[in-house]
Amino acid sequence: MASAYYEFYRGSSIGMALTDSLDELITSGAITPQLAMKVLQQFDKSLADTMVKQVKTKTTLKGHLHTYRLCDDVWTFIVKNPSFKMESSDIVTAPRIKIIACKNGDSLDGPKK
Amino acid sequence: MSNKIVPSIYRTVIEDVIQAIKPEFDEYGVDEDVLAELKRKWQEKVLASRVADFDAPQQPPPPQVPQLPQQHHPYPPHPMHMMQPHYASHNPYGAVAAPGQPAVKAEPLDGRYMLTSGIPYALPPLPGPSLTNGRQLPPPIPPHPGGQTGVLSFPRPPPPSAPVQTSANTSPRPAQQTQASGQPAQQQQQARIPQVDGPSEFSGDEETPSPPPSQGNFAPRPSHPSLPQPAPAAPPAPRDDSEAINSELDDSDTEGEEDAEEGTVGETDIVFCTYDKVARVKNKWKCILKDGMIHINGRDYLFAKCTGEFEW
């Protein structure tokens, strides 16, 4: 089960904040890299569980698909002029956005059985 | 803003991780102070990233002050404070043999104090746990007699080394930026020199003006290869150069695109998510994305489900 959690959320803001904090503690000798890895694994788990349990927001995204790529079950999209329509009907846009999407955990378990 | 849920979710995640990892810290023999420090650092960085409106900024991030004391606090103060009562209490008894006695009695007492003050430091001399503790504290801990000075002096070296590294990490970037920007270069460098004694402050300053997650990305990584990659630091000038060189080898269109992708990973607006379904009919793409963290325009948004429709 422990390995069923994706690590790629570590690249998010909160994940990078944790990674940097752990780096500092390793550098100062307060913790070992092994322990830091445990913390990151716990983060993978906590984040995924919290997202599933507590986030209910639905959004839609439109834009011009500039690049698409499927490698090792990971989709990468680069969307030009994306516009996210958030639930509160406000729209967030940007010149371009990169989407990294791993296979959903539910469907991930399916083939394994 | 529709990223209102972000602060509470992030808090939940932080609390959850810290709670759940406590047993591991115990198992590794790491003091709970360190865990608290990790939590504080983490919260501070998330707040400083300003990816959402964290309504209650409990700690108005003064990065300079906390960092140094943190590292000093847990260890040195304890022995220091405990030593004084120790001498005071023993002098009345052995007032005559003042010079000799403290030295003799200091050894066993020190051992005890070490045990009480910081378990990780006390254990290393023992044969059994020395393995785990050896990992944790790189320099070997001297045996009992020298142990006291070891405890006192050991925690100090790391803080300087850490600041030095961070300042070394950050300084090359300013140098590159200054090369690009030109005039304010010397002023900035001069201004930086006094800040070297508080490198944490410097890094903190750095985080505030621009989106910090990106800074966080760059600070450790490009600095390790000793700043040979000019792409993130000084985008305009090097890109011209690289294009001039690579244009013969590569398709210039995609090359520029790739540069933009890889070079500015941290600054790029990005979505981390999972996908349920990705479908295409001719040039129309439809995908159903789940559990996403959007980082766009320096802010974070979360979604449980996102329906994407693109034209290629």
Image (spheres, rainbow, N blue to C red):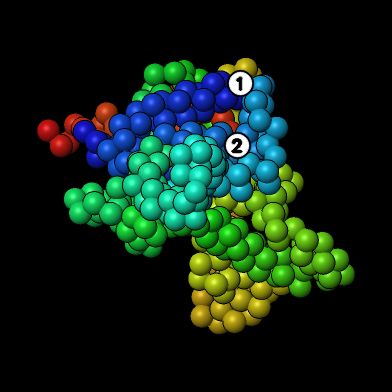
Residue B168 visible in the shown view? yes
Residue sitting at x 60%, y 36%:
B44
User: Which residue carries the number 2 mark?
Assistant: B44
Is residue B309 toward the left or the right of residue B234 in the image?
left
Residue sitting at x 52%, y 60%:
B157
User: Which residue carries the number 1 mark?
Assistant: B4
Image x and y of residue A12, in percent: 50, 41
Q: Quick one: label 2, few (<14), some, or many (20+) residues within 10 Å?
A: many
Q: What element carries label 2?
A: helix
Which three-letter amino acid code belongs to the residue tagged 2? Glu
Which three-letter amino acid code belongs to the residue tagged 1? Lys
Is residue A107 toward the left or the right of residue B216 in the image?
left
Is residue B266 toward the left or the right of residue B35 in the image?
right
Q: Marks 2 and 1: which is nearer the front? A: 2
Image x and y of residue B289, in percent: 42, 32
Q: Quick one: label 1, few (<14), some, or many (20+) residues within 10 Å?
A: some
Give the chain letter at badge 2: B
Q: Depth check: B231 or B279 in front?
A: B231
Determine whether label 2 and label 1 are within 8 Å by CB.
no
Residue sitting at x 47%, y 23%:
B12
Image x and y of residue B232, in percent: 62, 62
Q: Residue at the far front: name it.
A: B96
Give the chain letter at badge 1: B
The numbered disc on residue B99 is: none
Residue sitting at x 61%, y 44%:
B69
Q: Is mark 1 on a helix, strand or loop?
A: loop
Quarter-of-image position of residue B282: top left
Quarter-of-image position of residue B165: bottom right
Q: Which of marks 2 and 1 is nearer the N terminus?
A: 1
